[in-house]
Amino acid sequence: MKSLLMSALMLTTAMLGAAPAGAQPALPDQTIKNIVLVHGAFVDETSWDGVAAILTAKGYKVTAVKNPLTSLADDVAATNAVLDAQNGPVVLVGHSWGGVVIGEAGDNAKVASLVYVSAFAPEKGETITALAASGPATPGAAAIRPDAKGYLTIDPAVFPSAVAGDLPKKIGEHLAAHQMPINHTAFDAPAEVAAWHDKPSWYVLSSKDLVLDPHAQAFLAERMKAKVTTVEGSHASLASHAKEVAAVIEAAAGAK
């Protein structure tokens, strides 16, 4: 999975004009230089490769968290471990399920701002299960299936169109066949923290998302009073619209 996805994302990054690593410019002193990226369910940290390449080429220190996807608490612990290792303030970014994680870990003193990308943003006490049930049904959510051990994946036949409709079909099919299952208990765990109450927040809204309904994304972003950027992308807009997503992260870092 990694080599195929990385090749596609690196090609996209090159087409977008990211500078080579050897030509990294110096960032202004006031810019937050540490970026921590948190992936969603069903994928791994390589889903951020396109965004990471763009930001790294501009001089940011980018770290992608590898979530175990075993529970909300475990994912928050993994994210906090990365945050604690950073030297200075951090922009914390979450995609999809990763939005729940950054809402908790965003309480870390090193986090200066939050960026949500097609992401859930629960209030204290809310669960993903409840939020999903309260909004419009989507093809992606309807295709989530449990295995015998209670780990969830998306029906591989539905995954390419529902999750990654604006990525090459072969990429969507490969991602579907190599999903990273998430423990069903994660979706039932109530949020204990909603860091967006206290940290400035940005939101990338994906208008063609077939997993997290765009209207639900708009509600979450408005409730957070987040600065919203809309892209005409699928749930995989972090890959298909890497340039726009990177630009929003730069804004959250104070560079724009």
Image: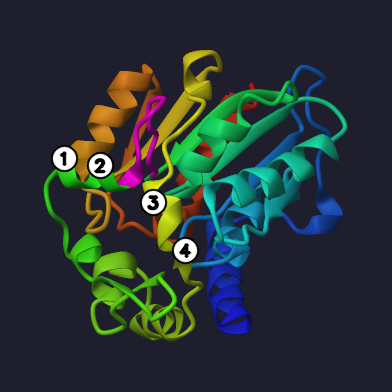
- For mark 2, what is the residue? 130
| Secondary structure of the residue carrying numbered label 3 | helix
Query: Does residue 126 show up magenta in the picture?
Result: yes
Q: How far apart are marks 4 and 2 (CA)?
A: 16 Å
Lower sequence index among marks 2 and 3: 2
Regarding residue 90, the answer to whether it shows in the image is yes
Kindly indicate whether the residue at mark 1 contacts the one at mark 2 (C-beta within 8 angstroms): yes
Colour mapping: rainbow
Q: In this view, does 14 lie to the left or right of 223?
A: right
Identity of the amino acid at label 3?
Answer: Phe
- For mark 3, what is the residue? 187
Q: How far apart are marks 2 and 1 (CA)?
A: 6 Å
Residue 44, given in percent of the width and then of the height, sits at 57, 66
Identity of the amino acid at label 4?
Answer: Asn
Lower sequence index among marks 4 and 2: 2
36 is higher (above) or lower (below) than 201: below
Regarding residue 60, the answer to whether it shows in the image is no
Residue 254, given in percent of the width and then of the height, sits at 64, 21
Give me the disc on residue 134.
1
- For mark 4, what is the residue? 183
| Secondary structure of the residue carrying numbered label 2 | helix
Residue 180, given in percent of the width and then of the height, sits at 51, 72
Give me the disc on residue 237.
none
